[in-house]
Image (cartoon, grey):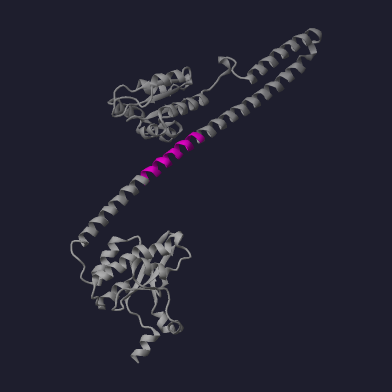
Amino acid sequence: MEFRNILEASERNISVVLVSKDDTHEPKISTSVLSRQLAGTALVVEIENRNVDEELEHCIGRSFGCRNGAIRVYFPGVRFDSPSDSKRHRFFLRADIDSLGAEKVQELIANGVCRRTPVFSSMGIFTIEEIQNTQRSHRLNELRLRIAESNKRSDEWVSLVEEENAELIRQNDAITADKIQLECEFQQIKDDLEISNNDVQRLEYEKYQIQSRCETANISDSLHHLRSKLSNHPNSLAELLELFQAMFPDRLDFTKQAVDSVKDVSCQDITIAWQALYHMATTLYDLFFCEENIGKDYELEFQRISGHRLAMTEGRQTKRDKKLMKMREDTYNSITINITPHVKFDKDSIRAYFCPYSDEKTKTRRIVIGYMGHLKTDGTRRRKN
């Protein structure tokens, strides 16, 4: 209760800085240094025993409490009967002190306390304005005495001048007080903004750490999934597609149509299909999405490196047939894609029809396979007829 009485003694016009201890049983800042910085303006109180924290909150209320390494500045005129008044008094959590640093917190406390320390004329002369007012008052006294000696009837004039001067001084003092109050509030906002910006940076760092842990977990899950797929050699195109989806999730993808299409396709040599898909995920991907390959002949380069044939388009008659070209369309990410380009796998004429998909908004770039097999062309249709 004695501490509460000190805080409520507003006539003392002095702030109180309460410093608690954390798990290390030590304050987060040097109370001796802070006491020297605030000499004459604030009383620095250090809680010696953490067991005092609960008793203190019982006396002054939880909203005004200070525990677990925190620091609270109680400015004059504390109103414990109003919990909302606690917002007027600066409060630094242990995390704030760790983030800002002890020296910065001490600087913020010292600046805030000094700005709010009231100055009374009865305590002395502290500003240039007070010096000017004192000089003016002395001069008026001299004039009044001089006029009184020469003409006593001028007392009324002197009285009026003094009244006018007193009114001007009162108005000036009110303006000065308002100015100081606004400056204090402005600086308070700047200090709070600095703390908020620091909190934002801390939260951004924590977000980055969480994202990194999530990415690591995703990579670990992907590797586990991939290793499980490698336990057995794929015996069909369907198993091969599933394996390559796990191996190259950022480079290669298959639409539902592609997955459905391989169910009816028989591949005599899975090894050749493996090699073709591997080069589509590596060689073909680099040809389309690496700037150094801009302007190259994709068909010649792909065949030179992989040994597999690449066709970027169909024959003239096939392109003129709307029904045949409609077969070379698919849907990916809710948009229609053109899968006319294709890679020939083997002598069985198995082809992988694909689209070099790119989304600038999401920075997504993939070789999207939309069909595997052999789509009809004008030539195959005429031969069948």
Residue furthest out toward the right: 150
Residue furthest out toward the top: 149
The quarter of the image holding the C terminus is bottom left
The quarter of the image holding the N terminus is top left
Q: Principal SS element in the magenta part?
A: helix
Residue furthest out toward the bottom: 385
> Please, is residue 32 above or below residue 178 in the view?
above
In depth, the one of 201 and 231 nearer the eye is 231
- Image side of residue 140 versus residue 93, left or right: right
Q: Residue at x 69, y 12 (%)?
A: 138
Q: Residue 25: horizontal and vertical position, in percent?
A: 29, 25
Image label count: 0
- Image side of residue 175 versus residue 352, left or right: right
Q: Residue 311: horizontal and vertical position, in percent?
A: 40, 74
Q: Residue at x 75, y 16 (%)?
A: 158
> Please, is residue 357 above or below residue 168 in the view?
below
Q: Is residue 201 magenta?
A: yes
Residue furthest out toward the front: 304
> Please, is residue 339 above or below residue 21 in the view?
below
On the image, which quarter does residue 354 sit in? Answer: bottom left
On the image, which quarter does residue 233 sit in? Answer: bottom left
In depth, the one of 103 and 193 nearer the eye is 103
Q: Residue 254: horizontal and vertical position, in percent?
A: 33, 68
Question: Which residues are drawn in magenta?
Answer: 190-207
- Image side of residue 286 versus residue 115, left or right: left
Q: Is residue 112 magenta?
A: no
Q: Residue at x 26, y 53 (%)?
A: 220
- Image side of residue 280 versus residue 165, left or right: left
Q: Residue 30: horizontal and vertical position, in percent?
A: 38, 22
